[in-house]
Image: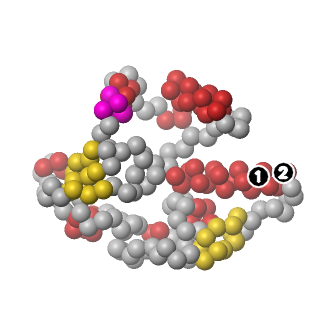
């Protein structure tokens, strides 16, 4: 049976997805602005905003048109090539900020890992080669790479998290050292 015709529920997640996070108990199927609707048509306010990655809301007409236009032109090139939109955006960011260069990553984990490495590099070069500590909250979530998990002081890797366990908002301060 084709995947698009397979009936799925939130319980399907528990059976087919590796339990490295615990999503809500409903499955959103439609979105508009800050709202999403589940399989039964119940409306919710989406406070997660794509986990701060795509906090532009759902299905805004200008964004949909921009994505459609770009998708009909050139969709994804990886970092084997560069592309005009990325170079234009980088130039605008440099012009509007303190930066001399920018870094584009594919995920928050990549962005956080780059930020940690750049902070350590800067501290070592500008202050002392012994300035290599990263200060973070214990059990904070910074991504699923080995470095970002280590900085958060998590004793278990994400793969070892118990299914449906919610990470507590209670945090202890920890210092990560290389």
Specify whether residue 88 is in view: yes
- Colour scheme used in the picture? secondary structure
Q: Residue at x 77, y 62 (%)?
A: 132
Rendered image: mark on residue 101: none
Residues tagged 1 and 2 counted as in contact (Cβ below 8 A)? yes
Relative depth, front residue between 46 and 1: 46
Q: Position of residue 162 (x, y in %)?
A: 39, 77
Residue 132: in magenta span: no
Q: Position of residue 19 (x, y in %)?
A: 36, 68
Q: Position of residue 137 (x, y in %)?
A: 61, 70
Q: Quadrant of residue 154?
A: bottom right
Q: Position of residue 112 (x, y in %)?
A: 59, 54
178 vs 82, left or right, is right
Relative depth, front residue between 30 and 96: 96
Q: Residue at x 56, y 66 (%)?
A: 149
Rendered image: mark on residue 125: 2
Q: Main secondary structure of the magenta part?
A: helix
- Read off the magenta span: 61-65
Tag 1 secondary structure: helix
Image height of 161 relative to 109, above or below: below
119 vs 138, left or right, is right
Residue farthest along the right direction in this orientation: 128
Q: Residue at x 61, y 61 (%)?
A: 147
> How many neighbours does mark 1 have within 10 angstroms: few (below 14), some (14-19), or many (20 or more)?
some
Residue carrying label 1:
121
177 vs 39, left or right, is right
Q: Quote the CA–CA distance across marks 1 and 2.
A: 6 Å
Pick the quarter of the image with the C terminus.
bottom right
Tag 2 secondary structure: helix
Q: Residue at x 50, y 26 (%)?
A: 85
């Amino acid at each position: 049976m084709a995947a698009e015709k397979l009936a799925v529920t939130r319980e399907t997640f528990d059976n087919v997805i590796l339990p490295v996070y615990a999503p809500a108990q409903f499955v959103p199927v439609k979105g508009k602005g800050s709202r999403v609707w589940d399989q039964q048509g119940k409306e919710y306010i989406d406070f997660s905003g794509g986990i701060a990655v795509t906090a532009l809301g759902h299905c805004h007409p200008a964004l949909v048109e921009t994505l459609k236009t770009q998708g009909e032109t050139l969709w994804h090139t990886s970092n084997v090539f560069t592309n005009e939109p990325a170079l234009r955006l980088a130039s605008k960011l440099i012009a509007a900020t303190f930066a001399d260069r920018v870094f584009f990553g594919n995920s928050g984990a990549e962005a956080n890992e780059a930020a940690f490495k750049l902070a350590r590099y800067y501290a070592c070069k500008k202050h002392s080669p012994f300035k290599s500590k990263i200060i973070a909250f214990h059990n904070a979530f910074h991504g699923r790479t080995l470095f970002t998990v280590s900085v958060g002081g998590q004793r278990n890797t994400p793969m070892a998290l118990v299914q449906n366990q919610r990470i507590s908002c209670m945090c202890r301060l920890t210092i990560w050292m290389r």
